[in-house]
Structures are given as C-alpha cells and as structure tokens.
Image (spheres, rainbow, N blue to C red):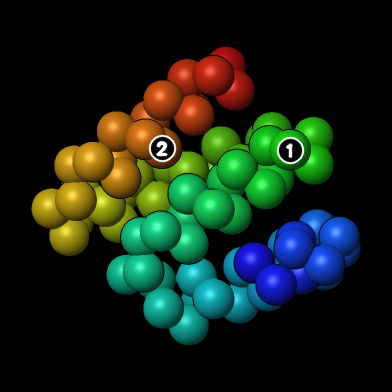
Amino acid sequence: MECISSGDPAAAIPQFGLLIEQTPDYVPAYLMYGQLLARESRAAEAKQVLSAGIAAAVKKGDQHAASEMEALLTDLG
C-alpha cells in the first residue's frame, strides 16, 4: 500500500504477490491486489487473484470478503 500511496503502483504488484505467497490466508491482500491489477488494466491477472482470494475467504469463513471479491470479479466480466 505504501508503493501505491507514493504514486508507484507498478512497484506494489510484486509486493502483493510476495505477501500472498508468504501469507496465503491473509484474505484482505487478495482484494487489494485484485483491485490494483484491475486499475492497472490487468484484468486477467486480477481475475486469477480474486478467484484465489474467494477460495481463501471461504476457507476462513469470511463471507463478507468473498462477496466483495465476487462483485469485483463480476465487474471484470
């Protein structure tokens, strides 16, 4: 998020990938990463991240996060 705040969203992309790799059960990272990829016109990657995030959210019982990611996934087509 620091990279995004400083105006360098491209630098945030590998950081989010690393975060998810190291802490795959941290559900909010999937939503933030998916949103970033969507804003950067990387819809295919965003869809993959969001799909993985939905699975992680369901596994943790976090229906709210799953619903948010499902909505964004639907918006992406």
Query: Which circle marks residue 53 in the picture?
Result: none
The location of residue 60, given as percent across then percent down, is 17, 60
Mark 1 Cα shell of 10 Å, populated few (<14), some (14-19), many (≥20): few
Q: In the image, what residue occupies the spot 47% across and 55% down?
A: 30
Q: Is residue 66 left or right of residue 22?
A: left
Residue 61 visible from this viewpoint: yes
Residue bearing mark 1: 39
Q: Is residue 45 left or right of residue 29?
A: right
Residue bearing mark 2: 69
Q: Quadrant of residue 19?
A: bottom right
Q: Is residue 67 left or right of residue 74?
A: left
The location of residue 26, given as percent across then percent down, is 36, 69
Tell how many labels: 2
The quadrant of the picture occupied by the C terminus is top right
Q: Which residue is situated farthest in the front direction here?
A: 5
Give, as a three-letter code, the residue at label 2: Met
Give, as a three-letter code, the residue at label 1: Arg
Q: Quadrant of residue 35?
A: top right
Q: In the image, what residue occupies the spot 48% across and 82% down?
A: 22
Q: Is residue 7 left or right of residue 23?
A: right
Mark 2 → mark 1, Cα distance in angstroms = 14 Å
